[in-house]
């Protein structure tokens, strides 16, 4: 597309990064199911390997279908470049990898996807990295947790599982003052509802498995760079600012400027960690993104209606949806995500653990699965599944206590969803059925 005007989100979600295929005219982005690409000649090959010319070598590093998706997500997020990878969890490791060394830490929110809490509190220790968990509702606590070994601050814009809102600007200011990048996991918000870079974030990570793909078909991840962080200012990020021995002494920041993080992610990250997205997955995610705004509008409209209905149900003790006027996060939601607070939230049942299990076993339209952001409505009892590996204290801090059910509202007919919830709640708490 000729960039003569600033296209709107709805146009970019369909067009950004894609062009009719130059060889065939194919209008939809082809699935370039090829491992390798023929070099024009020996000099061309040498230039590609030296990163003096951009092109395709081998699909562990770059693939034309995946490249379209990278440009599409980078554009929607307002970033300068993006690297796709095999899952959301891979994206988190890929985001931290250029920043961290043994002995370094990341300051992370207590309210994260359960798998991320485990990845950060346990698995990254094997790399000599560590995480400090703090309450991101308190920017001063974040400032106090940052020390001379902190290399990143990490939080979710709309936090899983409760759908709580993070004041991205306030935390970005804290990270800025300390000279470290803020990484936002924007999976549950999507760039349609929140563009963290506009609120001061340096990097955005996604599990594209969720709303971006939207149909529950493939796993994938993405790291978007704002291109705005000065990697050379502090000497804290030598893999980007100094000669990188893993790439024959290349200085990424000096050589690529704003694109340093993206090039590093491909040339070192994907090359050596190998967490590559395959072109089939990129294809499904590209199809999904074409309808992202339409789906998110319906997810939000349905979630608002259903959360308001649940809040009045006698079996329900609390509903966490930030789109509800009663939510302590409602004012922040209007500031951070004025288009809506997403489609994910939790509610607590007065009947506790047993009522939650009965509810989960009684739903008919809702599917009991460990996923979110599908066109289908989904539900799960976090304490016995996604947040099972966490201690009881971590579960409470993450908003996933034993009496909590998480729901991901789909795009079905809202009244059908309410009817399903009503019959399941009647079975879970027969003595408290709605009048
Ligand atoms: C699912 C999820 C992840 C992990 O993504 P995968 O694609 O499953 O690896 C990370 N963060 C959030 C908020 C998620 O919902």
Image: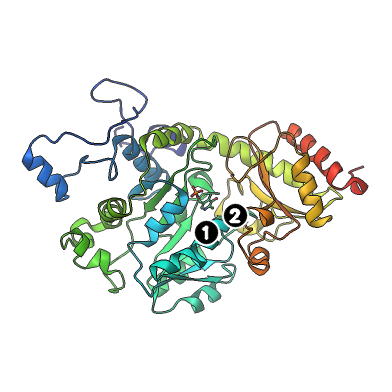
Answer yes or no: disc 1 within 8 Å of ligand 1.
yes
Q: Quadrant of the C terminus?
A: top right
Other-residue count near label 2 (Cα within 10 Å), few / some / many at <14 / 14–19 / ≥20: many
Q: Is the residue 230 above or below the residue 1 in the image?
A: below
Q: Secondary structure at mark 2?
A: loop
Q: CA distance from mark 1 to mark 2?
A: 10 Å
Q: Is the residue 108 above or below the residue 71 in the image?
A: below
What residue is drawn where x is 68% and y is 44%? 379
Q: Is residue 135 left or right of residue 182?
A: right
The answer to whether the residues at label 1 and label 2 have Cβ atoms under 8 Å apart is no
Q: How many marks?
A: 2
Q: Find residue 116 and name its label.
A: 1
Residue 347, x across and y down, in percent: 74, 52
Q: Find residue 160 and name its label.
A: 2
Q: Is residue 225 visible?
A: yes
Residue 100, x across and y down, in percent: 36, 67
Answer yes or no: disc 2 within 8 Å of ligand 1.
yes
**In this view, the mark in front (1 or 2):** 1
Residue 193, x across and y down, in percent: 54, 47
Q: Is the residue 176 above or below the residue 348 in the image?
A: below
What residue is drawn where x is 30% and y is 37%? 3
Q: Is residue 185 left or right of residue 42?
A: right
What residue is drawn where x is 50% and y is 77%? 145
Q: Quadrant of the N terminus?
A: top left
Q: Find residue 348 and name its label.
A: none
What residue is drawn where x is 71% and y is 57%? 327
The part of the image, by quadrant, that contains residue 366 is: top right
Mark 1 vs 2, N-terminal side = 1
């Amino acid at each position: 597309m000729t960039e003569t005007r600033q296209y709107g989100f709805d146009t970019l979600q369909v067009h950004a990064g894609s062009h009719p295929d130059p060889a065939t005219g194919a209008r939809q982005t082809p699935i370039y199911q090829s491992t390798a690409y023929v070099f024009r000649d020996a000099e061309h090959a040498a230039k590609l390997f030296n990163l003096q010319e951009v092109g395709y070598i081998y699909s562990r590093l770059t693939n034309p279908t995946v490249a379209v998706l990278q440009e599409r997500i980078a554009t929607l997020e307002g970033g300068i470049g993006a690297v796709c990878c095999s899952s959301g969890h891979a994206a988190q490791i890929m985001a931290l990898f250029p920043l961290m060394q043994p002995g370094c830490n990341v300051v992370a929110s207590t309210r994260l996807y359960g798998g991320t809490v485990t990845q950060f509190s346990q698995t990254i220790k094997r790399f000599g990295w560590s995480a400090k968990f703090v309450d991101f509702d308190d920017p001063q606590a974040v400032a106090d947790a940052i020390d001379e070994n902190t290399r990143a601050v990490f939080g979710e814009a709309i936090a899983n599982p409760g759908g709580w809102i993070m004041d991205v600007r306030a935390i970005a200011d804290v990270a800025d003052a300390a000279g470290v990048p803020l990484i936002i996991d924007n999976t549950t918000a999507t760039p349609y509802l929140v563009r963290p870079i506009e609120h001061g974030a340096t990097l955005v990570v996604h599990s594209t498995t969720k709303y971006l793909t939207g149909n529950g078909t493939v796993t994938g991840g993405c790291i978007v760079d704002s291109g705005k962080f000065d990697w050379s200012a502090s000497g804290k990020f030598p893999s980007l600012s100094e000669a990188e021995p893993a790439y024959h002494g290349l200085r990424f920041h000096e050589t690529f400027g704003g694109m340093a993080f993206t090039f590093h992610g491909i040339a070192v990250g994907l090359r050596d960690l190998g967490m590559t997205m395959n072109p089939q997955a990129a294809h499904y995610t590209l199809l999904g993104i074409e309808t992202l705004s339409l789906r998110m509008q319906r997810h939000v409209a349905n979630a608002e209606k259903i959360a308001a209905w649940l809040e009045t149900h006698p079996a329900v003790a609390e509903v966490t949806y930030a789109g509800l006027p009663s939510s302590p996060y409602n004012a922040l939601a209007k500031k951070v995500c004025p288009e809506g607070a997403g489609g994910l939230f939790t509610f607590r049942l007065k009947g506790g653990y047993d009522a939650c299990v009965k509810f989960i076993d009684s739903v008919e339209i809702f599917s009991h699965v460990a996923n979110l952001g599908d066109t289908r409505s989904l539900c799960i009892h976090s304490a016995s599944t996604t947040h099972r590996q966490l201690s009881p204290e971590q579960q409470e801090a993450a908003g996933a206590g034993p009496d909590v059910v998480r729901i991901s509202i789909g795009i079905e007919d809202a009244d059908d969803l309410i009817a399903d919830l009503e019959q399941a709640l009647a079975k879970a708490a027969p003595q408290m059925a709605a009048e």
